[in-house]
Amino acid sequence: MKTEHLSVDPSSPDPLLIARAAECIRAGGLVAFPTETVYGLGANALDPVAVGRIFAAKGRPPSNPLIVHVAEAPQILNIAAVWPETASRLAEKFWPGPLTIVVQKKPTVPDLVTAGGPTVAIRCPAHPVARALIGAAGVPLAAPSANRSTELSPTRAEHVLKGLGGRIDMVLDGGPCRGGLESTVVDSTGPVVRVLRPGPITMPMLEQLIGKVEMTSREPAQPGEVARSPGQMARHYSPRTRLRLVEANDLLEDSIEARRAGLQVGSVSFIRPDAGLAEVVGEGGRHISLTADPEMAAALLYAALHRLDELGLDLLLVEIPPDTPEWSAIRDRLSRAASRN
Ligand code: TXA
Ligand code: MG
């Protein structure tokens, strides 16, 4: 299959192009589109055959459920069996935006979307292209990140094409995603809201609105172990190159050591001053100094890892950012990227 690449204005996409993509969705096709977090791979959430194509294109295990994307809050009426008070307050405050809310599902939602489970994850994205596409399609979109299973999420259309070119019908290219890390996922089905995946909406932001919130164990499930909640497999968000996390203070020394062992090294830093690092990784290696600002770092992280991954190096050494709420999503993704499982 040839993947059609359509460039659209990210803030006011051409309605004719959106109509073409929406037609493709209604016909059961797969369309990658930008959101404010990462690119999603969309299909009609109410069409099990179309949803099946998402799993096939990504090589995603059917045990990992998908997020259903809506353009307007009232669309949830057809999807959620119960809409708890906390969900309603969270949606009012953070939608449209990078928050995904898990609630009990209605039977209209195909089992494939929810991996056979009784709950469904719902998100209302803020990106104008995503909103226009869902609106024009007239159906909710099941959309995981538009990458092969376990690999890095895409923050640009080029990343989507690198992983899924030839396997999907179309990509709407709206340029780089602003946020750069996947949405926060919260489970709103119990008495206390639980964070299943840390993201741009941080614990303090949630707690300020609804009081005490629980964080699920940060230990990702090991292979062979039943995940406590879906999507918590250890290996995820991974570049193909081996990635190791190192304390800020050890980054320079560990790079030197790896070089001495004859490895071609890439490195990424956030907080630590990078004096010396570019020299250490040397020719053939590459050091990328991101930024000590967590929001900006989130926006740049995956593009940096995609770039380093393309160099075919032996090892990526990445500084572990501080253990504070603003860095929590980055720490979570990096620890999964570093997992060999
Ligand atoms: O920012 C995002 O959330 C992006 C954009 C495209 O919206 N989407 C995304 O989807 O990251 P995906 O499929 O890569 O990650 C969805 C996460 C997975 O960890 C999945 O297990 C979890 O949400 N999830 C989905 N449905 C769930 C459910 N019913 N219960 C618990 N977790 C669920
Ligand atoms: Mg994903």
Image: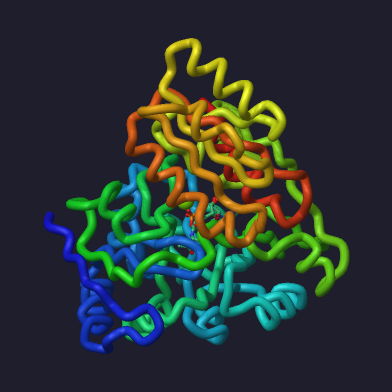
Left or right? Give the position of 166 relative to 128.
Answer: left
Could you tell me which residue is drawn at 40 percent across and 62 percent down?
40
Q: Position of residue 144 (x, y in %)?
A: 43, 57
Rendering coords of residue 170 (x, y %):
22, 65
In front: 84, or 281?
281
Residue at x-position 71% and y-position 75%: 90
The mark tally for this picture is 0
Above or below 145: residue 277: above
Q: Give the farthest residue toward the top.
A: 261
Foreground pick, 72 / 126: 126
Query: Residue 242: x percent and y percent?
Result: 46, 27
Frontmost residue, 67 versus 34: 34
Horizontal and vertical percent position of residue 143 = 42, 62
Can residue 147 be seen here?
A: yes
Whether residue 341 is visible, yes or no, is: no
Residue at 43% x, 17% y is 263
Query: Which residue is at 50% across, 79% downward?
Result: 78
The coloring applied to the image is rainbow
Which quadrant of the view contains residue 309?
top left
Q: Residue furthest right?
A: 211
Quadrant the N terminus occupies: bottom left
Q: Is residue 288 left or right of residue 136?
A: right
**Relative height, residue 191 to residue 130 (above, below):** above
Name the image quarter holding residue 29. bottom left
